[in-house]
Amino acid sequence: MTQPYTYPTNQLDKPEALLALVGTFWENVYQGSFPVQSYLYARGQLDAQLYLNTLDLLASVSRYTVPVFRKENWYFLELLESQRNLSDANLARYIGTHAYQPGDLEYGIPVAGSMFSWNVDPQLVDVPAITNRITDPSLTFLNGVDFLLEKNANNGKTSLTFRDDPFADPLTPIRTLLKDNKVIDRQAGLWIYRGELDLNTVYEQFGYALGVHLSSSEGYRELINAVFDGLIDGGSSLSLDRLFATVAGVDLAHGTEVVEDIVYEPNTTLVITDKFVYRFNPRSTIVPAVGDTIRKGDSLSDALTVFEFNRGQLPPDLRALAVGEGLLGSGYFQDLVFENKVVPLVVEEDVDGYTKVSFEVGGVPADAEAFWADVHRNGVASGQTLAMLLDQRPASARTSQPTAMALPATVNPLGFLTSNLFRDNLFVVKLRTASFGPGALGMSVATLARRLVPPGQCCVVLVELVFQDDPVTLDAPGDDLRPGFTESVKTFTGTAYQESLPYTLIRESVRVRYHSGQCL
């Protein structure tokens, strides 16, 4: 857990303590202690920064403690007056509410107004405060009150937007820039206190070995550790759970704990245990209740749910499972869907001399017919059809092909898969995007699970997407019989399935490569 920053941290933050260390010789050279004390404090700040850099260096040796960002006690910020309001923060963004007029807004042209924004170092990720000088500042800007730091995800630029123009404040240190004895610009010099810089330390130290380069964050470091741990331990369930937890931006249980309280706030939901406090998206559903005991690696919200079928159990909230090409083989147009519901078992007697059974399977009808034809044909070839496996008669009475009386009347398609085929070699990870946390890395990193899934195991990822209702514009007041709006229905019949394609739709290409080497 991150410890809060305290000031003063050590003797380097106490000018009077530094003054006592140098003795009294300076009294014969300087009048008063202020010059010496100021010099010692400034030199002490350099040493304090060197101490922080040394701690970061030592922490970078381990992938568990490698710092995500570099902490700078003091960072000099230079702002040019000519660059004011040229950042992306002053560009208009269309959100569906602006009525454009000729000459109103132009693409790529900053909006003229009362904003005071500059493009700054893109490595800056956090700026708590800005002052006009290091010692005894008379002007202080606070983040979220006097300025905002924003990063454009599209082009990587970082903008710093002030509420008031710093050039208009007489306390801001400003110097005039001259060229050929003419004023060409003005420059403001300010100091960022305890800022954080993104130096890609996690990637430079460990992420490069995996070929995974993301924006620096706590989740990115946890992702790197989860993948490394999975490669070392052979792909344990905990490593996979940690990987998908970074996808969803949620925390797993740190250890064996007892849930003491669950607090619902407007912007977050808190799960308070006897050891930690976990934060979740307010739209997520919390799995444990107050008084429950959670264990290391448990998922605490519906953002991440893992279904394992090692005991043949069928979770009620797993409504269906689509079996794709990787499990069906070739020759199918789309996936086959096995739903979690009870359907009748269809029995056909004397098909190639055997009883053929089938049940409802979602997907393209031609695929379903081909699937059951393959199942029956393979059963006949092996001398043991699916109907023979479902025969409920005693072994001594199985002298003929089973009829409908000897077979179950109903079957659960998904339950049939989980109990017979996927019981020991498949698990399902369900991700609910509406419950993702603010630090979610997204589905792009979920492909790393391919490196961790052990041989003979299959991981199926179900993603529950977020949907939004379409707004309805009322044209007129409604009444008990007529609504206040009108709507029209449009249909699309879609394209018909075809067994063959015209040769004009097929394109082929040839790639020639030259390989040379020496055989030993």
Image (cartoon, helix red, strand yellow):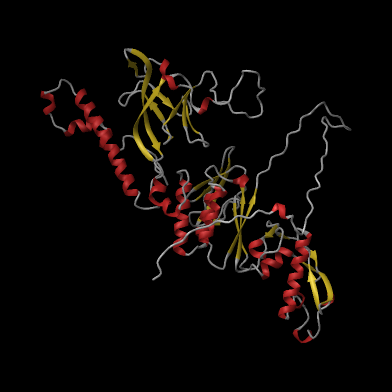
Give the quarter of the image for residue 405. Answer: bottom right
Residue 19 location, quadrant: top left
Q: Residue at x 55, y 49 (%)?
A: 444
Residue nearest the viewer, comparing 32 with 201? 201
Q: Where is residue 77 shown, x and y percent of the image?
A: 37, 27
Q: Is residue 267 left or right of residue 406?
A: left
Q: Residue at x 51, y 34 (%)?
A: 152
Residue 297 position, x and y percent, is: 52, 57
In this view, 83 is above or below 312: above
Query: In the rendered image, is residue 412 in sight?
Result: yes
* Residue lying furthest top: 181
- Name the residue: 75% across, 62% down: 367
The one nearer the camera, 443 or 512, is 512
Count every numbered label the image shows and give the total.
0
Q: Is residue 462 left or right of residue 352?
A: left
Decide if residue 329 is on the left or right side of residue 145: right
Quadrant housing the C terminus: bottom left
Residue 317 placed where, x, y %?
68, 56
Asked if one can make out residue 295 in the rendered structure from this viewpoint, the answer is: no
Along the viewing direction, whichever of 116 and 2 lies nearer the viewer: 116
Query: Which of the 4 image quadrants contains residue 402?
Result: bottom right
Is residue 259 placed above or below 144 in the rendered structure?
A: below
Q: Is residue 387 above or below residue 413?
A: below
Measuring from the top left, give residue 399's x and y in whole percent.
79, 86
